[in-house]
Amino acid sequence: MKKTPSFAMSLSLKKKSKPAETGKIAVGMSSVKKPHRPALGGDTARKDDRTSIKIVANVDVGFGNHLYIRGDGCGLSWEKGAKMTHIGDTHWEWECQCKANKMCFEFKTLINDQIWSTGDNYVAIGKRNEVFPVF
């Protein structure tokens, strides 16, 4: 008959460890905590419900002039324009945070919030929209 080493027997007599805390409550183990999940408020939108939308316009509006944007979504209005940021020679940019289900909207660009670009309204679809307005 084969002898079992004493250290092997001592290993088999050790207590088994507690189950990992996974958010499930094991029978007889009321001390296991569930992970913390913040409660959602009624009208409060979660950050992950918003998406960044960027409109980039490629146009030369002349020295001293600014490009504006008007529209019907993402905080824009058809009555008063939002000033776009000049990011390069002929590049203008406007960025906002929109609800994920409101990412599609119409807009148009204006010089100095007075001179409308020609043609139909642009439609923003997706996170980045590049346009080439003509005045």
Image: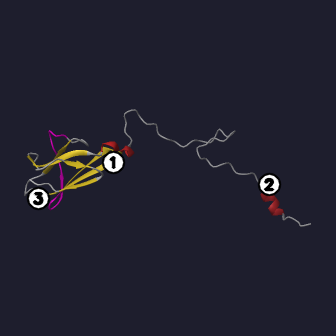
Q: Amino acid at mark 3?
A: Asp
Label ID, residue 60: 3
Residue drawn at x 59%, y 41% as measured from the top left: 33
- What amino acid is at disc 1? Thr
Residue type, mark 2 in image: Leu
Query: Disc 2, disc 1: CB below 8 Å?
Result: no
Q: Position of residue 64 (x, y in %)?
A: 7, 55
78 magenta-colored: yes
Relative to 38, 97 lies left or right: left
The residue that disc 2 covers is 13
Q: Residue at x 37, y 44 (%)?
A: 49
Q: Residues within 10 Å of mark 1 (few under 14, many from 20)?
A: some
Disc 1, SS:
strand
Report the side of 120 relative to 12 (left or right): left
Range of the magenta residues? 77-91
Give the alpha-carbon distance from disc 3 to disc 2, as whole Å.
Answer: 81 Å
Residue at the disc numbered 1: 51
| Image location (x, y in percent) of residue 31 | 64, 40
Q: Nearer the viewer, residue 103 or 51?
A: 103
Cα separation between marks 1 and 3: 29 Å
Numbered label attached to residue 133: none
